Image: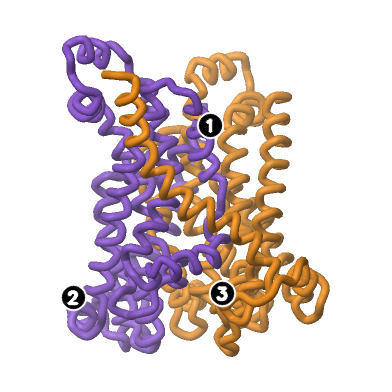
Amino acid sequence: MSRWSLRLWIAFLILPAAAVMVVFVVVPIVTALAYSLYAWHGSARAGFVGLDNFRVVLTEQPYAGWTLRAFWHNVIVFVSLMLAQNGTAFFIAYGLLKTLPGHRFHQVAVFLPVILSTVIIGALWKLLLNPIFGLVNNGLTAIGLGSLAQPWLGQESTALGSLIFVNAWHWVGFPALLFLAGMQRIPKEVLEAARLDGAGDGVLMRRIIWPLVAPAATIAVLLMFIGSFNWFELPYVMTGLDGSPGGATDVLGLYFYRTAFGGVTSGLQDFGRGSALAVLMFLFIIAVSILFTRMLRRREIEV
Amino acid sequence: MGGERAKIVFIQLLLAFNTLLMLYPIVAMLLSAFKPTAEIYATPFALPQEWRLDNFAQIWTGTNFPRYLLNSAIITATSTASILIFGTMAAYGLARYQFRGNEVIYLFFLSGLMVPLKLAIIPLFIQLRDLDLLDSRLGMVCVYTAMGLPSAVFILTGFLRSLPGELEQSARIDGASEARIMWSIMLPLTRPALVIAGIHNAVPIWNDFFFPLVFIQSDPLKTLPQGLTVFMGEYNTDWGVLFAGLTIAALPITIIYIVLSKQFIAGMTHGAIK
């Protein structure tokens, strides 16, 4: 084959994929930045306004208050999920590592919700959490804890917590099997030798298991962070686009969507402010992700 | 050894409790799908008094569900196929040939893994509007293909690089064309990686809700998760039908998952492991 036709062949292989990426990833990302610098009448572009859209969403009331409240909710979601989802996942992985009878079944069960759509999970739990007919309150009453039964999604004090629980239930299998894969790379001989030397579970965990799971944990934390700050589908399905009740479940994803495409009550679209919010979220996620990876990598090496 | 024994029992109990917590809501959904709404309200924990298919019949004939199911199947199959075709081509070019710029192009694809494409929804919306691809299945396929290519290129390039070069070399000496070598010698060996890359992309596409929510407006084009939200609103007091709808929506992928659980777990956690 001649040099030229080989080049042509390689170009034929790579160009279609590269073209799709340029048209549907590179161009949109670059233009997102540009769009945030213009005024928009709904979805039609008007004049250049510089950083005005950013000023409005960050400093002008009531927008700034909404931005801050949504951001704060995302922080709560991230921190709680770290504990509830990744924490539980770690213990499940440790339990599965023992390969006790039935471990394969437990593994398939814990991963089952992971493969289902958030819409199915959200709709199902919305029915289960129904204050009158839902299984959760009925179950509490049945075991004599009827006093704990409450309108989980309907009151401000429990709505966000309920969503966090459902999210953890939905995804816990993912980090669990990540951690398990990390733990399984530890050679059996190493564990046995350590045990023979009289190392207890605590020492094993600290000295051998944790350092070897750390790379998987880095990724789990990173994915959790990105997921928490992109959170949209579950609150949309369970508590609605307005983040009801009273904005108690409003997060950046919902707020961004409402700003850009219009809410339930107001059909007002504003692509300018929406783009400004998207750019801010994008920069925040990328910056923290890079910082995270650096920090956690360094700690892994130290351990 | 009594302590060890007690610990194992303890772990086993915790795992069993967790599995119950994971499965019970799904079992309850399935059982409720066979009950009339009044029975769900009256005896939520009991087995159905009678295994009636009325709720399912209502969905199959009275709603657009079959249509949503078909749309999801078409979009998922087409997107996954184009991700695998374009992804394999690009990965093959990057993995099996040395040329200037190879590494840069590989990094270009990889950088796509880091981008939360959801946040580019406004420019994507305008892009599709300008290309006249809004409210069309083809538009969805384009976006999903772009979204899936980075991971497919990543998985397949890694795999193709690990294949030995001897077969390829001897075929080349025998005078086989590059296309022939790729198609008849290398690609058959790539099948396991194709399965991983396929599942890795098909499951999130099948389940996706965000992009159809923004891009698809007309009801006959809606996907299953999107149609499900419409249907939840319409039938919000008819719980029997609601549970049956959720069951039908969950059924196809659950069955495939139970049969192929190993590949599913490997496919979905791939990239995060290693």
Are both tags, 2 and 1, on one chain? Answer: yes
Residue B174 image position (x, y, % from top left): 17, 11
> What residue is shown with label 3?
A145
Name the residue located 80 percent from the left edge and 80 percent from the top edge: A61
Q: Nearer the viewer, residue B50 or B90?
A: B90
Q: Which residue occupies the foreground of this view, B13 or B243?
A: B243
- The Cα atoms of the two marked residues, 3 and 2, are separated by 31 Å
Colouring mode (rainbow / by chain / secondary structure / one colour): by chain
State the mark number for residue A105.
none
User: A77 left or right of B171?
Assistant: right
Q: Which residue is mark 2?
A: B51
For mark 3, give the secondary structure.
loop
**Which dot, 3 or 2, sits closer to the camera?**
2
Q: Nearer the viewer, residue A140 or A300?
A: A300
| Label annotation for residue B104 | 1
Disc 3 to disc 2: CB gap under 8 Å? no
